[in-house]
Amino acid sequence: MEATHVSVLLNEVIAYLAPKDGGIYVDCNLGLGGHSAAILEASSPGGKVIGFDWDAEALEIAQKKLFIYGSRVQLMRRNFATIQSSLQELGVGSVDGILLDLGLSSLQLDGGDRGFSFKGSQALDMRMDDRQEETAAHLVNTASEEELADIFFYYGEERQARPISAAIIEYRRSQAIATNDQLVKIVEQAVPKRFHPKKIHPATKVFQGLRIAVNDELQNLSKVLVDGTGLLKINGVFCVISFHSLEDRMVKRFFADEPKLKVLTKKPVVPTDEECRLNHRARSAKLRVAVFAGNN
């Protein structure tokens, strides 16, 4: 499937990373390769990018996009939480910059077959990597009412977590929940209309919570922040783009509490009105940046 994807905060990322000839940069969530292509252009002729992505389909598209850069690119189908061991395998001891874009790609949202979106009827999968065993469907059909409520409340920050989880338990007594549209209808009916959010779909936070749980996203983020920091050269730059408050708070606290890092963004950098107009999915993006100052 051919997909288009607009890389969020592209100019801002390049300005902070300031890619240079001979530099080594890690793109932890490659997506369709937009950020990586810009880093390679800016670091010509000798800059290199090591790209990570779980998603085999996205990786294949990115590989075609970045083919022209030859040996300047090394792509790995791995979770970015493996950054330390993966770079060791490649014989790379330190890097000049790390980019972590935590958003879903247009391929995942519009691909129509993994249940990330509210559109159509898709299998309720939500795995970033189809080599994983547990799907979102398995989770909603086997977890207890309390476990589901905790997932929606803590990972999705959904205030109606308890009535939604109760409705799921009631629904699955008669039939399994196998598709995204089934779950959407359950959520819409469980939450009174007066509590439906005005700016987002009423199932947004439930889907967010499930996706985070299925893919262990917060645990992986915590690990890559720690391990990535340890791989940065002096003055190496760590850029993180997050799309919801849980991730943003984690990054903000880590950057502030890590004595080896100097925060460059006192407030997160957000997209311009023009970028949001051209790409509505950019509207919730927040970029935080820190530089490795060394042992204090």
Image (tube, rainbow, N blue to C red):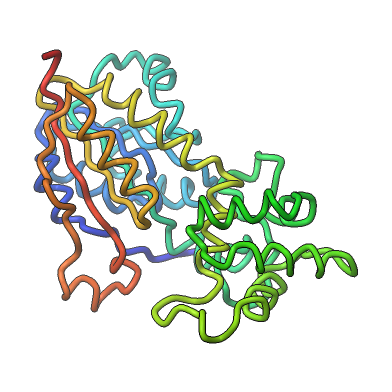
Residue sitting nearer the eye, 8 or 91 = 8
Q: Is residue 52 rendered to the left or right of residue 72?
A: right
Q: Tell me if residue 24 comes above or below residue 241 in the rendering.
A: above
Residue 129 drawn at (x, y percent): 59, 44
Residue sitting nearer the eye, 289 or 85 = 289
Q: Is residue 74 rendered to the left or right of residue 162?
A: left
- Determine the residue positioned at 66% across, 39% down: 131
Q: Tell me if residue 167 comes above or below residue 66 in the rendering.
A: below
Residue sitting nearer the eye, 285 or 80 = 285
- Determine the residue positioned at 78% across, 56% down: 141
Q: Is residue 292 rendered to the left or right of residue 279?
A: left
Q: Is residue 168 rendered to the left or right of residue 286?
A: right
- Determine the residue positioned at 42% across, 58% down: 105
Residue 72 quadrant? top left
Which residue is farthest bottom? 193
Marks counted in the figure total 0
Residue 18 drawn at (x, y percent): 9, 40
Residue 233 seen anywhere in this rendered image of the structure: yes
- Determine the residue positioned at 71% across, 40% down: 133
Q: Tell me if residue 24 comes above or below residue 200 in the rendering.
A: above
Q: Quadrant of the C terminus?
A: top left
Residue 44 seen anywhere in this rendered image of the structure: no
Residue 269 drawn at (x, y percent): 16, 55
Q: Tell me if residue 124 comes above or below residue 92 in the rendering.
A: below
Residue 78 drawn at (x, y percent): 50, 33
